[in-house]
Image: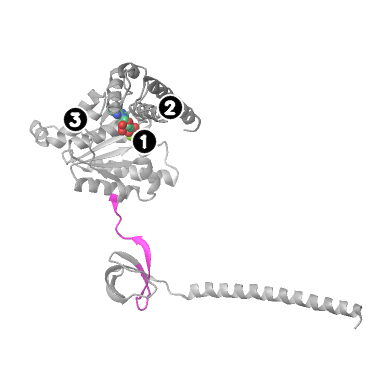
Amino acid sequence: MTTKEKDILDNVVYNYSISTIQINEENRILKETVSKLKEELDKFKALPLMVAEVRNTFGKEAIIRLPNSNQFYVQVSKECEKLAAGDVVLADQKNLVIVKKIPITKKFDIESFVIIEKPNVPWHNVGGLDMQVQEIKEVVELPLKKPELFKKVGITPPKGILLYGKPGTGKTLLAKAVASSTNSTFIQIVSSELVQKFIGEGAKMVKEIFELARKRAPSIVFIDELDALAAKRVEIGTSGEREVNRTFMQLLAEIDGFNPLDNVKIIGATNRKDILDPAIIRPGRLDRLLYIPLPKTEARFEILKIHCKNMNFSKDADLKVLSDSMEELSGAEIKAVCTEAGYFAIRENRTQVTKNDMVMAIEKIRQDAEENQEYLEMFG
Ligand SMILES: Nc1ncnc2c1ncn2[C@@H]1O[C@H](COP(=O)(O)OP(=O)(O)O)[C@@H](O)[C@H]1O
Ligand SMILES: [Mg+2]
């Protein structure tokens, strides 16, 4: 063979092997497609599985209950994970062998969705707000503690109260304090969460929350950010709004449904009283409105003392003078000042908090508040 002939032959062999590779590749793709189509076809052929609830388990056998309430003693397939009563499973239609467990729990446990506690907030942890404390004691505490008094006098106490005012002024604190003083179960709902997290379930949640409240009475249902649930609506357009509205209607129904002398009280809180739907504050509902103001001079001093109680101050720190310089700060901000001042000391390896630490902290909290305000004006 000449070199030229050899070259030609090499070329042929090369081209041939290239096309073999291509054909193999095409073959592979076709096979894959066929197998995918077969899989799809199998899905169409497969019988649907039955959804059932496990009642009892006995090793690899179990008693299940079908939606029509018939019960069967069945086998559990080897691949199926360990089962317990209450699990929801898929079973073969013909022989009812349990194929697998699906992650649905039949019982929907309201207690894991709300904040429920027995708070321990003594009245002396609430600074200033003397008149407001007085009013809450009359409207919430007294009926819970002495319902017979109301019967004797022949009046019905309000079912609840609406606290309104700027953020951080102590609304939640007051609600917890009255729950403490009456030894009540405190059930807190954050309306915006109720609306966002439980789409389609909001109304049911409200119903269950009040059931829980009655079961755990005496109790206080604290509905925070009430405006998210009970805002005035011009017209109800989107399905989201309809859903919020259904939840709100359920809330009204629950409030209307219970007896004012049942051991359940409702405390609502909002910083947007202006946008509330008047339906919620109609007589017989949350008809007591209580404004929670920003603390004035004396109140600020009281609040500062509460939050400074355990702080180690140098002599130059005069709490009265400092509280005077905290105009317009809320209770929550006064508390934040104390923490910040403590950090200024820690950063300089001191264990004593000085007047200067406090002054710097006040400055910082004011700045934070201002920035927050600007942000809210831009995006809020
Ligand atoms: N009047 C007050 N007295 C004492 N502490 C207060 C007061 N107001 C607010 N605080 C502090 O600020 C924290 C947050 O206040 P919070 O009750 O949640 O305010 P709101 O519910 O009105 O937004 C409280 O836990 C408390 O430590
Ligand atoms: Mg609050």
Q: What is the CA distance from the residue labelled 1 to the residue labelled 2?
A: 22 Å
First in sequence: mark 2 or mark 3? Answer: 3
Q: Which residues are magenta?
A: 89-111
Local crowd size for mark 2, using a 10 Å CA cut-off: few (<14), some (14–19), many (≥20): some
Circle 1: element type: helix
Circle 3: element type: helix
**Ligand 1 quadrant?**
top left
Q: Give above or below for 350 relative to 211.
A: above
Figure quadrant of the N terminus: bottom right
Residue type indicated by callout 1? Asp
First in sequence: mark 3 or mark 1? Answer: 3
Q: Residue at x 71, y 76 (%)?
A: 23
Q: Quadrant of residue 185?
A: top left
Image disc number at residue 369: 2
Does the numbered disc 2 mark a residue whose Cβ is under 8 Å from ligand 1? no
Circle 2: element type: helix
Q: What is the CA distance from the residue labelled 3 to the residue labelled 1?
A: 24 Å
Image disc number at residue 227: 1
First in sequence: mark 1 or mark 2? Answer: 1
At which x and y percent is residue 25? Answer: 68, 73
Closest to the observer, 338 or 312: 312
At which x and y percent is residue 39? Answer: 53, 73
At which x and y percent is residue 187? Answer: 26, 42
Residue type indicated by callout 2? Ala
Q: Which residue position is annotated with label 3?
A: 137
